[in-house]
Image (cartoon, coloured by chain):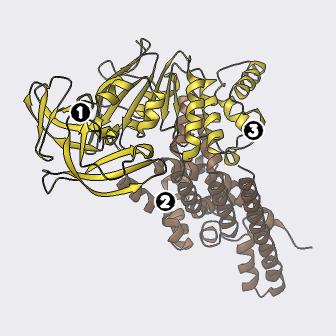
Chain colours: A brown, B yellow
């Protein structure tokens, strides 16, 4: 019986980081969409950098930040939060790497939002918070959903930053992707193959889910969504 | 006094300086696109913020730059019908209307009032449809219903018919007019369509470059637009510079004619206007020889372009429009205009 810990670990890291990225990405996108152009350009570069940087570079920066002898790292240690060589560090790595995907798709959706919808809600006396969740998010939900799925998939497949920050400890920090590499490196071709298939299966399910949602969305549009 | 507006706002090179008031009436603001009509409405609704000025509705101060009062749109009780109706996607017609009833705490009362509105607007059969499945007219009614159940103190309509097919417009204008007759509150409609403005509004203000020129009764405005902008926007096709030559006489150099007017000419005359419908081959007054350039047939009318015989070479041709029944066998050699139909246009 293969130890399924890497699957469980990957899923919890991907799930938790997706939730964080969901809110952080939406918040940043909502704010950025209404900034003046120059400021938006600068912010855009900073927020999108992790998408184009090699994940190992992201991992390097994360180590600089969270290393146990760094100010922030040691502060977190005092609070009992250890990120380096511990699975929650995987969440930090996945958040940084997956964030730009959520941010960019959500921002695109927010920018094409018809502001008249929000204004008409305001003149009807509806609160800005209600309008945000029931009107803006509803109108932008396709972009936001796409961003969330992309972010989840990216978080699930994250390797570079994760291996630098939390390494590979069987039963403690091992994820699906770090396990594939480790098993291959130690000539366990069969083991690696098993985890490759697991990875393929998860990716296929995610893509299938996206396609299904898109079809339903299109049919809904036809019926007058 | 229902609404009093006196605001200024600078947006890039555009400058809005709107000052007008609106009683419990149907007031129209007529102007070309980009003249600041929508921005004015947005300032009243609280969506845009004026740089300076004051907006008072039924004694409530909505905005006052000196007293630093700027109510959020939620507290202004101003209904705004958007050009594209702005129905919430993913919600049915009924849910959209219920959005206007959020202040009503009792669910039963909410449901009941939504049903009454659906009934009043004759859209009960559409209650479970989503905005994408509605025609333009149905969407307009839904949006209007959502605003009316909200019971605003002022209703603003932003080009309410421009998203509709032409053949539907007249029908919906009639429906909206009868629906809102006896509404008992102020209504402001902005439009660029003079026919629409004429049909719907009690009073009209013409807007140009962010300023509202004199507001007056709709019929009076069409009969005596007073300014070149108002004459153009109310559809006057023939406008030429003119100068006063007598108490009731003006000279138009471009056409090289001397016209007699019915009303005394004041100082500061800038131009005269003659509507294309107001030429007549049988009119003895202001009658001058003309030469036809070309003509074009329309379903029920003819449109001709002609020149006065002494007209300046560089001056544009003059338009004449007449019903088919009165088409003469040959183009008349001279055309006259009743003195009461000479529009006197003054400097602003």
Query: Is residue B227 shown left or right of residue B159?
Result: left
Q: Badge 1: few (under 14), some or many (20 or more) residues near its Cα, within 10 Å?
A: many
Does B236 appear above or below A56? above
Query: Is residue B335 shown left or right of residue B163?
Result: left
Chain letter for mark 1, please. B
Chain letter for mark 3, please. B
The reply to whether label 3 and label 2 mark residues of one chain is no
User: Residue A184 appears at what percent x and percent y?
Assistant: 74, 84
Please say whether residue A172 is visible from this viewpoint. Answer: no
Q: Badge 2: few (under 14), some or many (20 or more) residues near its Cα, within 10 Å?
A: some
Query: Is residue B18 shown left or right of residue A7?
Result: left
Q: Where is mark 1, residue-wise?
A: B342
Q: Badge 3: few (under 14), some or many (20 or more) residues near its Cα, within 10 Å?
A: some
| Circle number at residue B126 | 3
The reply to whether label 2 and label 1 mark residues of one chain is no
Please say whether residue B142 is visible from this viewpoint. Answer: yes
Which mark is in front, 2 or 1?
Answer: 1
Q: CA distance from mark 2 to mark 1?
A: 66 Å
Does A5 appear above or below B73? below
Q: Where is mark 2, residue-wise?
A: A47
The reply to whether label 3 and label 1 mark residues of one chain is yes
Residue in the image at 59% along x and 40% along y: A132
Chain letter for mark 2, please. A
Mark toward the start of the polypeptide (3 vs 1): 3
Q: Quadrant of the N terminus of chain A?
A: bottom right
Question: Outermost residue, front direction?
Answer: B329
Does B245 appear above or below B324? above
Which mark is in front, 3 or 1?
Answer: 1
Depth check: B27 or B87 in front? B27
User: Residue B237 appears at what percent x and percent y?
Assistant: 30, 44
Quarter where residue A85 is shown: bottom right
**Circle 3/circle 1 CB separation < 8 Å:** no
């Amino acid at each position: 019986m293969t130890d399924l810990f890497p699957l469980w670990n990957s899923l919890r890291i991907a799930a938790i980081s997706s939730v964080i990225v969901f809110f952080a990405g939406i918040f940043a996108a909502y704010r950025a969409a209404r900034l003046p152009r120059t400021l938006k350009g600068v912010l855009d570069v900073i927020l999108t950098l992790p998408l184009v940087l090699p994940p190992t570079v992201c991992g390097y920066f994360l180590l600089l930040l969270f290393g146990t002898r760094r100010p922030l790292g040691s502060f977190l240690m005092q609070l009992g939060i250890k990120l380096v060589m511990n699975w929650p560090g995987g969440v930090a790595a996945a958040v940084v790497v997956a964030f730009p995907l959520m941010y960019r798709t959500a921002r695109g959706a927010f920018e094409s939002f018809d502001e008249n919808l929000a204004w008409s809600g305001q003149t009807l006396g509806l609160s800005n918070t209600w309008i945000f969740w029931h009107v803006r998010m509803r109108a932008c939900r396709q972009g936001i959903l796409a961003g969330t799925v992309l972010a989840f998939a990216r978080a699930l497949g994250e390797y570079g930053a994760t291996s630098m920050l939390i390494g590979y400890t069987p039963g403690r920090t091992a994820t699906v992707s770090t396990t594939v590499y480790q098993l291959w490196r130690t000539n366990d071709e069969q083991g690696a193959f098993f985890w490759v298939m697991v990875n393929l299966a998860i990716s296929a399910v995610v893509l299938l889910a996206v396609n299904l949602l898109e079809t339903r969305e299109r049919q809904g549009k036809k019926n007058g969504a | 006094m229902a609404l009093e507006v006196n605001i200024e706002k600078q947006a890039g090179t555009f400058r809005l300086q709107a000052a007008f008031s609106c009683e419990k009436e149907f007031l129209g603001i007529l102007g070309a696109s980009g003249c600041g009509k929508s921005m004015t409405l947005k300032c009243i609704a609280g969506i845009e913020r004026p740089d300076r000025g004051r907006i008072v509705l039924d004694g409530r101060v909505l905005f006052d730059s000196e007293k630093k009062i700027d109510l959020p749109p939620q507290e202004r009780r101003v209904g705004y019908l958007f050009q594209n109706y702005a129905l919430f996607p993913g919600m049915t017609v009924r849910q959209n209307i219920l959005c206007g009833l959020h202040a009503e705490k009792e669910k039963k009362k909410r449901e009941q009032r939504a049903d009454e509105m659906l009934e009043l607007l004759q859209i009960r059969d559409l209650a479970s449809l989503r905005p994408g499945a509605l025609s333009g007219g149905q969407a307009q009614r839904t949006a209007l219903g959502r605003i009316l159940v909200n019971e605003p103190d002022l209703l603003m309509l932003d080009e309410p018919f421009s998203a509709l097919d032409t053949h539907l417009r007249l029908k919906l204008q009639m429906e909206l007019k009868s629906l809102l007759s006896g509404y008992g509150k102020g209504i402001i409609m902005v439009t660029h369509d003079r026919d629409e403005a004429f049909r719907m509004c009690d009073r009209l203000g013409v807007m140009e470059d962010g300023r509202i020129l004199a507001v007056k009764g709709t019929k009076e405005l069409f009969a005596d637009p007073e300014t070149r902008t108002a004459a153009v926007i109310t559809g006057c096709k023939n406008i030429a510079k003119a100068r006063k030559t007598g108490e009731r006489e003006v000279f138009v150099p471009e056409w090289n004619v001397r016209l007699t007017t019915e009303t005394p000419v004041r100082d500061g005359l800038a131009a005269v206007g003659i509507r294309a419908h107001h030429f007549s081959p049988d009119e003895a007054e202001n009658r001058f020889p003309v030469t036809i350039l070309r003509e074009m047939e329309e379903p029920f009318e003819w449109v001709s372009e002609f020149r006065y015989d002494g007209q300046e070479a560089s001056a544009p041709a003059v338009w004449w429009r007449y019903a088919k029944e009165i088409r003469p066998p040959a183009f008349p050699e001279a055309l006259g205009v009743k003195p009461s139909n000479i529009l006197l246009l003054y400097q602003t």
